[in-house]
Amino acid sequence: MKDVILDRLHYGHQGIEKCLLRARENAFWLGMTQDNKEKVKECSICERYNRKSQQKQPLLQHEVPRGPFEKVAADIFHLDGQNFLLMADYYSKMPFVKSLKTMTSKETIDYLESVFAIHGIPKVVIIDNARQFTSFEFENFRKQWEFKHVTSSFHFPQPNGFIERTVQTVKNCLKKAKAKKENTQLALLSLRTTPIDNILASPAELLFNRKVQSQIPHIIRHGSKSEGITRHLEQRQAVQKGYFDRQAHDLPPLLENQQVSVQDTGTGLWSPATIVKHSGEPRSYII
């Protein structure tokens, strides 16, 4: 079991400190720190991809936002012949990754719209001068969704610390997962559910204000607010059932070999059929 947990802690190949942050949140055994260190040091994939490159320039940093999705950054990167759109939230550090097929403004806009429709419209979107972001289509998108569009290469000359680091982190995560033939989405889940440091929670927890279940077993604690919401949802569900059941009644169970008619939900037409047996699921039969 310990080996399984070690493997899952290292899913995403984030390094010793990040593995230990995940471990301390979810597990404990004697020698856990040393076991994690040895696991990372013995990883051939990490050894292959973690070599330092040339000297980097000092980072240029932004003002820290007060909450999630006030400010996001987007960038396009290339990996193993594929193009990806990365969007990341400055507050939670949550990365959103989309594989691009056409590299058009429309495809880029469609994905950003889908994220904004779920998480809300950010006040500021920081991007570079890639053609997907400088097109007439993108400007119309910006006006319709009413966010401020800041071009990083003008207002914030490269290297833009946050997005540069996030691109590199995500690229490393994907490269290592592919090299080890691991599920890339599980690798990204590992990245998103790993605490940022000893004080800050994971990107997922900072964004959603709750712990997100990953492959590492842990107890998800629901506070009094969550319990109140659950009770309210149960009450709403009971009211909905009451309204629905006013015009409904239980039907008698069907028997094996009973002749019935089955409606095609697509066409609305009925066809004769014979009951073989009950499927084991409520109100469901094999015909």
Image: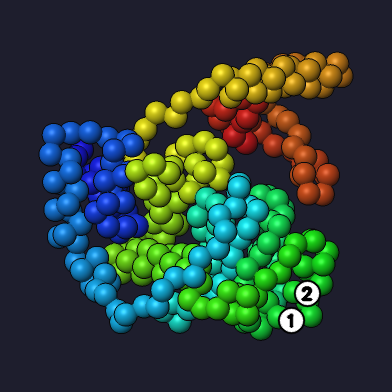
Give the image's coloring scheme.
rainbow
Q: Is residue 45 above or below residue 265?
A: below
The answer to whether 136 appears left or right of 74 in the picture is right
**Label annotation for residue 245:** none
Residue underneath mark 2: 139
Q: Is residue 196 above or below residue 229?
A: below
Q: Residue at x 19, y 48 (%)?
A: 36
Q: Quadrant of the C terminus?
A: top right
**Marks 2/1: CA–CA distance:** 6 Å
240, 212: nearer the viewer? 212
The image position of residue 152, as x and y in percent, is 60, 75
Residue 104 in picture, x, y percent from top left: 67, 79
| Disc 1: which residue | 135
Q: Amino acid at mark 2?
A: Glu
Q: Is residue 17 left or right of residue 127?
A: left
Report which quarter residue 153 is drawn in. Answer: bottom right
Q: Residue at x 77, y 67 (%)?
A: 142
Q: Image quadrant of residue 28? A: top left
Camera sees residue 82: no
- Residues tagged 2 and 1 counted as in contact (Cβ below 8 A): yes
Residue 170 drawn above or below residue 216:
below
Q: Residue at x 55, y 55 (%)?
A: 64
Element class at badge 2: helix
The kind of residue tagged 1 is Ser
- The correct choice, above or below, for 42 with respect to 257 in the image is below
* Residue 178 x %, y %: 35, 67
Q: Quadrant of residue 232?
A: top right
The residue under the point 20% across, 68% down is 47
- Quadrant assignment for the N terminus: top left
Give the secondary structure at mark 1: loop
